[in-house]
């Protein structure tokens, strides 16, 4: 018999954050995160360096999580880890560590889908959305509209056909000479800029899908053409350029979300993933939500970007359903919902 108020240790290592959290009876006790700064000088995450940094950090991060939750390893009822999607070398570190613990402690193992976890980040704190709801999940690798019927019952009803929204933010920042990850920098420069100073072309996609590759190219040409006229164009207009590209990307995201709501009749609307930390998106969603009569759910900043608390939430519901996995389960760089 498994306990109905389980204590679970969850580990996240899909990209460049090493994180561990402890959850008891569905309540997250902590969320320890070691961020990797080693990638900054390379302008993007270097998979091999990410994997090595996870190896260096994981023991301390897990120890910190157990200690601050005042739990011993023997108190744990299960060990959970991110199986995918993500960088294979990074996923392997968390998966191997979790398997080792599960084997050593003779406890069940729970595999978690990282994108499902971004959605369940909404259940860490009140207010929580009611089912069914739509979740726009926007990160460095994904842009999806997910129809969430229940904790573990989700369907992708729209997604990007090329780049992710976070990638568009990061690439736009890189073209302006800003360091990685550029998304948060574009956000902060945008605060003092005029969002309608510059216009960019609209991209049409059928259904509820997205495409961000066109805007990336348009932005590249926009900078090139203006720099021919004035080599200091970016420096002189940084705030306005950031505000304008952010406004454009946010509009692209919210247009689709509006269509998704119309198509499904659902007015419970959530956002999740790293880009949901964007202040332009958060503000615009509140405004659109008010005008459309939506109940809007925006995660706390801590739970927008990658973290183990959200992995723990999925693990909790999987535990209650008895959904455990074998010790020989392999990580998946691509993992559908
Ligand atoms: O979910 P996440 O932490 O990792 C992935 O699973 O990809 O998302 C990271 C992405 C990066 O592209 C980063 O630039 C973007 O989220 N991001 C932001 C902001 N904070 C993080 N983009 C725009 N504005 C922000 N404030
Ligand atoms: Zn993520």
Image (cartoon, rainbow, N blue to C red):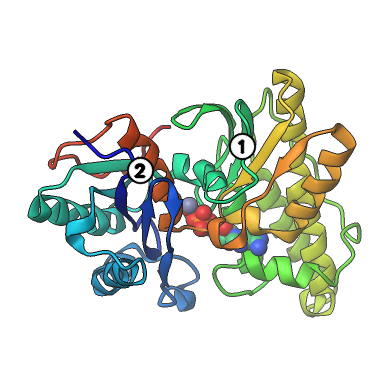
Q: Relative to residue 211, is residue 78 drawn left or right?
A: left
Work out whether residue 329 can be spotted. yes
Whichever of labels 1 and 2 marks the residue nearer the N terminus, that label is: 1
Quadrant of the rendering where the N terminus is positioned? top left
Q: Is residue 169 visible in the rendered structure shown here? A: no
Place residue 191 in its image quadrant. Answer: bottom right
Q: Residue at x 73, y 49 (%)?
A: 249
Q: What is the crowding at mark 1: few (fewer than 14 residues within 10 Å), some, or many (at least 20)?
A: many
- Residue located 44% across and 77% down the image: 37
Residue 165 on image: x %, y % = 62, 49
Residue placed most toward the observer, 137 or 11: 11
Q: Nearer the viewer, mark 1 or mark 2?
A: 2
Query: Which residue is painted at 64% across and 74% down in the image?
Result: 177
Residue 274, compared with residue 263, is above or below; it is below
Residue that appears at 76% across and 72% down: 189
Residue linked to disc 2:
315
| Alpha carbons under labels 1 and 2: distance apart | 19 Å
Q: Position of residue 204 (x, y in %)?
A: 74, 32
**Of helix, strand and loop, which one carries label 2?**
helix
Q: Say left or right for 125 vs 263.
A: left
| In-front residue for pair 214/51 | 51
Residue that numbered label 1 is attached to: 135
User: Tag 2: Cα neighbours inside 10 Å, few (<14), some, or many (≥20)?
Assistant: many
Q: Quadrant of residue 158?
A: top right
Task: Give residue 123's position: percent from left, percent from top.
Answer: 54, 44
Kindly indicate the quadrant of the structure image that contains residue 179.
Answer: bottom right
């Amino acid at each position: 018999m498994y306990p109905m108020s389980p204590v679970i240790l969850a580990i996240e290592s899909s990209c460049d954050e090493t994180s561990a959290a402890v959850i008891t009876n569905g309540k997250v006790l902590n969320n320890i995160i070691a961020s990797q700064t080693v990638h900054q000088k390379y302008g993007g995450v270097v998979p091999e360096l990410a994997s090595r940094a996870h190896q260096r950090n994981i023991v301390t991060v897990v120890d910190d999580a157990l200690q601050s939750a005042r739990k011993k390893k023997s108190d744990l009822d299960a060990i959970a880890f991110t199986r995918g999607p993500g960088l294979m070398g990074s996923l392997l570190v968390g998966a191997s560590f979790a398997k080792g613990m599960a084997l050593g402690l003779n406890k069940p193992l729970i595999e978690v889908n990282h994108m499902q976890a971004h959605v369940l980040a909404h259940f860490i704190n009140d207010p929580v959305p009611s089912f069914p709801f739509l979740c726009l999940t926007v990160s460095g690798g994904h842009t999806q509209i997910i129809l969430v019927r229940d904790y573990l019952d989700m369907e992708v009803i729209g997604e990007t056909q090329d780049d992710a929204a976070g990638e568009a933010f990061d690439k736009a920042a890189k073209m302006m000479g800003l360091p990685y990850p550029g998304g948060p920098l574009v956000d902060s420069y945008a605060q003092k800029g005029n969002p309608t100073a510059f216009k960019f072309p609209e991209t049409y996609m059928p259904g509820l899908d997205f495409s961000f590759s066109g805007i990336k190219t348009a932005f590249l040409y926009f900078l090139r053409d203006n720099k021919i006229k004035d080599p200091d164009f970016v420096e002189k207009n940084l705030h306005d350029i950031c505000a304008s590209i952010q406004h454009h990307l946010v509009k692209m995201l919210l247009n689709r979300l509006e269509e998704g709501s119309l198509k499904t009749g659902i007015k419970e609307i959530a956002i999740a993933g790293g880009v949901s930390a964007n202040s332009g998106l958060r503000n615009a969603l509140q405004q659109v939500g008010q005008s459309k009569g939506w109940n809007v759910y925006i995660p706390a900043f801590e739970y927008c970007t990658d973290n183990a608390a959200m992995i723990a939430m999925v693990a909790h519901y999987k535990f209650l359903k008895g959904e455990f996995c074998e010790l020989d389960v392999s990580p998946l760089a691509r993992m559908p919902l």
